[in-house]
Every structure is written in structure tokens, then in C-alpha cells.
Image (cartoon, rainbow, N blue to C red):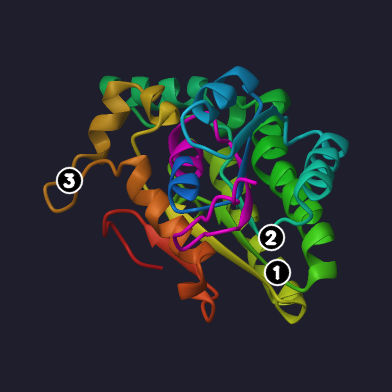
Amino acid sequence: MASEEVRTGRFADRVAMVTGAASGIGAAVARQLAAEGARAVVLADVNGDGAAAVAEGPPASRALALDVTDAAGVDSAVQDVLHRYGRLDILVHAAGADDPEAKQRIADAAVEGRPVELTDSLDDASWRRVVRVNLDGTFHVLRAAVRVMRPRGAGAIVVIGSSSAFDAPVGYPHYAASKAGVHALAQAVAKEVIASGIRVNLVAPGPTDTGMAARTPEALRSTFADPRVRPYATPEEISEIALFLASDAAANLGAVLLANGGRFTA
């Protein structure tokens, strides 16, 4: 009889789920979890085909289409992980949404040398879309993860937030507000569930070279140019921070870690 494969690495035998795993930071996290010994890595993304493409590479990976704004769908996906693998050890929540139209309007104002004027014309649909994905989606994912981790008395959750929660970019109120809400939500949940053996930490990236950044107009990207700091982090660099927080090395850490190239500190 063939012996079972012995996995090694800092995530050996762990069962993990990553949202927003079709690209960017989520994809980098998923690949690294698998490379460092995870027994199973579930890649969830609203772009199911994209998640499946990422899952083709690493071993022990499985993809599924998931819209984090669908509370019932999130519950079902996390329960499926529990039924298939018996537990959920690590959850990295990287799913999020931006507003390309608002970015273009900010860029246009910069090119034309005029003040940004967006709030008074920001429509309800744009506001709700960003808040539903970023804030409501984070609540759905955290709630579902806690439901399966609390009975076991163990688990590590890492949320990908944003430095925008601190520096509140001009002309981007819905995104900044949604991410500030994500930070407060994660910290409130962290203080509640630590007594159940569950750690919740958050990474707040600055400019990062993801698909979201690729949709940023060049006139706006250029505003990030600062000779004192690196312009854009790679997804892999942010992934390293997220996975440190998910690892046993961070067992005594409760934090919001700024990963913004040193632009500012909280």
C-alpha cells in the first residue's frame, strides 16, 4: 500500500481558504500556501475561471466561483470546506472592489489642474457596490469562518485591508470608508474571538501591482511617484506579510500592519 504523502513547511497539513484568489494578492497567497505544505488550499473568487487557472499550478488546490456579497453562498462555500477536509485552519480574505470610473475622474482633474469634485455626484449604485463587496463581503466571510473555527478552538484569519483607510484619498470616499469599516470590523472581531483560540489580523497595503492597480489611469499612478519610497509593491511581497500573520510565528500578534513602502505610519 502506498504511503501517504508527507508535507513539510510552515503550513504543513493546514487547510486554507483564500478569497479573491483569481489574481493579485489572493493568487500569490494561494500559491505560497500550497508551496509551503498546506494539505488543501481552496481558491474562491467571483471569477471562477480565473481561480481555476491559478489552481491548476499548485498541488492540493481547488477552485470555486464565489461572490462574497452573497451571504448564503459564502456560508455554503465555507461549510463545504469543513465537510471535505474536516476543518478550516487558515482564511485569507483578499476579495475587494475598486471604482475605475472614480479613478478616471480623479486622474482627469489632476491632468487639467483642477480640484477633484466627486462626492456630490457619486451615485448610490457606485457607493453600494464598493461597500457591499468590501465591507459586507468581509463581514460575510469573517462570520462564516468564525462559525467553523470556533467549535475547534483554533484558526487564523488574515484580512487584506488598505492604507486608504488611513490616508483617505481625495475623490475616493466610498473606497476609503469601506476599507476603514473593514479595519474596524476586523479589529472588533479579533478582540471577540481570541478567547476562542482564533486570531484575526489585517494587512493594509499601499500601492500594489495588481489587476486593480492596472485599471488605475497613468496620471493617477504617477501621483504615487516618490523618490523616497518604492512606487508599487508586488503581490508576493504583500503575500509574505499576510502569511506571516497566518503562521505560528505570529501566534502572539494582534495587529493592523501597514505595508505601504514607508509612506506613512499609523
Q: Is mark 3 on a helix, strand or loop?
A: loop
Front tag of 3 and 2: 2
Q: Name the residue under label 1.
A: 188
The mark nearer the N terminus, 3 or 2, is 2
Q: Is residue 130 left or right of residue 86?
A: left
Q: Quadrant of the C terminus?
A: bottom left
The mark nearer the N terminus, 3 or 1, is 1
- The amino acid type, in three-letter code, at marker 2 is Leu
- The amino acid type, in three-letter code, at marker 3 is Asp
- The amino acid type, in three-letter code, at marker 1 is Ala
Q: In this view, does 144 lie to the left or right of 128?
A: right
Q: How far apart are marks 3 and 2 (CA)?
A: 31 Å
Do the CB atoms of the residues marked 3 and 2 lie less than 8 Å apart? no
Q: What element carries label 2?
A: helix
Residue 185: which numbered mark, if any? 2
Q: Which contiguous range is marked in magenta?
A: 1-30
Q: Distance between the residues labelled 2 and 1?
A: 5 Å
Label 3: how many Cα within 10 Å (few below 14, some 14–19, many 20+): few
> Is residue 166 something one can see in this rendering?
no
